[in-house]
Amino acid sequence: MADLTAGSLRSRPLVLRYPATLVFLACLALFTLGVTILSEGFGIGVISTSFVKTLGKTLCLCLVALAMDLVWGYCGILSLGHMAFFGLGGYAIGMWLMYERTRLIVVDSLAAAPLPPTPQEISDGIASQIFGVVGASEFPPIWAFAHSLPLQLAAVVLAPGLLALVFGWLAFRSRVTGVYLSILTQAMTLALALYLFQNDSGLRGNNGLSGLQNLPGLERVGQATVSLWFFWGSALALGLGYVLATWVVSGKFGSVLRGIRDDEARVRFLGYPVEAFKLFIFTLSAVIAGIAGALYYPQAGIINPAELAPIASIYLAVWVAIGGRGRLYGAVIGAAFVSLLSTWFTGGQAPDLWIGSYRVQWVNWWTVLLGLSFVAVTLFAPKGIGGLIDLLAERRRPDRHGKDLGPGEGALREEEADR
């Protein structure tokens, strides 16, 4: 009877087996519909285009927080370098956006020439326009496929995925764990950021890639519409990412991940290939982060090496901790809450606070408040905002009787198995 019950549960769709996932997708769909109706692009104009972009970027940050929760909340790997993968995804799509937009400008400017321009002249003109700011006039090898949208979309996945695969293989096979692994991931991010700051890195150094909000060939389409397109894409990516993450952490695979998080030595003793599990989840989370970055930076309009600074990855860990690590919805809530609150405080919308004769300007004090919040959550509410939601939902264990028929907390008991 127990086998039949378990089999029937496994045959049901994933979202029906996990009601929290269905609730999340429904809330996301309602939120997307509401923003669409209230936007300037297709709705009544209550929400400005700039705020639609802010919401779209927030959804992308929720997606990278989801990736961080997979690797930290479920597998116990505190990565302080995941924003590097996020930035690589942004650079990959930004290269095509900047190349194609510049190509159209160069072709239009050469159209009035007495003789039609040759492909080499067009290529030289594009290179001069893009790299003149760093004193170069030729394409570096890294731009070999910048003209091809399909190849750059593949790079959005491959660039962060391969970096995570190589780094993870080297780190996990050496059995580097704990704080030492966190330091290594931070060092990787710092090294990548310092390299990209150089003018000869091939990505315009400190100038980065700009003008990414202008979609090539769609100049006549207003930003109100384009921002809504990216908002839809971000919402779709977050929904699909949430379903994928739910599938990954469910079942036996998810149990092994939690086992690695709680007692890696015991899981290894039981015969599971711990390094393979860690490498898979680390690489998968890097790919998800890269996709999030590819959707984020066209909405931001610019990307530069400062976006890959180690502090950005530390912020990401703070978001997940405040939201509640080990809970997928907690990571999403934490990223959305802190991101929107940061926009409010740093955008000059929060009123200044007077303490006696001292004036607290939140633009300067926001990071201090964020740090204090992280410390407070760690000490007094380790389950984060997600734990509060559990309390509000009044999750109570059912009144169950009899001896356990298995070692798990949710195992059937004698009386239940006989029904």
Image (cartoon, rainbow, N blue to C red):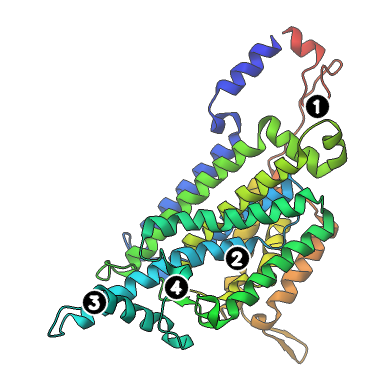
Q: Earlier in the sequence, mark 3 or mark 1?
A: 3
Q: Say which residue label 3 marks.
A: 107
Q: From the viewer's perspective, is 40 left or right of 264?
A: left
What is the distance, in whole Å, between disc 1 and disc 2 at their CAs? 37 Å
Q: Earlier in the sequence, mark 3 or mark 4?
A: 3
Q: Say which residue label 2 marks.
A: 339
- Under circle 1, the secondary element is loop
Q: Quadrant of the C terminus?
A: top right
The disc placed on residue 408 is 1
What is the three-letter code of the residue carrying label 4?
Answer: Gly
Camera-near label (3 vs 1) is: 3
What is the distance, in whole Å, between disc 3 and disc 4 at their CAs? 23 Å
| Quarter residue 84 falls in | bottom right
What is the three-letter code of the residue carrying label 3?
Answer: Val
What is the distance, in whole Å, between disc 3 and disc 1 at their CAs? 66 Å
Q: Earlier in the sequence, mark 4 or mark 1?
A: 4
Q: Badge 2: how crowded within 10 Å, few (<14), some, or many (20+)?
A: many
Camera-near label (4 vs 1) is: 4
What is the three-letter code of the residue carrying label 1?
Answer: Gly
What is the three-letter code of the residue carrying label 2?
Answer: Ser
Q: Earlier in the sequence, mark 2 or mark 3?
A: 3
Please provide percent x and percent y for residue 362: 66, 80
Is the residue under label 2 in contact with that under label 1 (CB below 8 Å)?
A: no
Please provide percent x and percent y for residue 283: 63, 50
| Quarter residue 163 falls in | bottom right
Q: Say which residue label 4 marks.
A: 301
Please provide percent x and percent y for residue 201: 55, 76
What is the distance, in whole Å, between disc 4 and disc 1 at their CAs? 49 Å
- Under circle 3, the secondary element is helix
Of residues 355 and 227, the one nearer the viewer is: 227
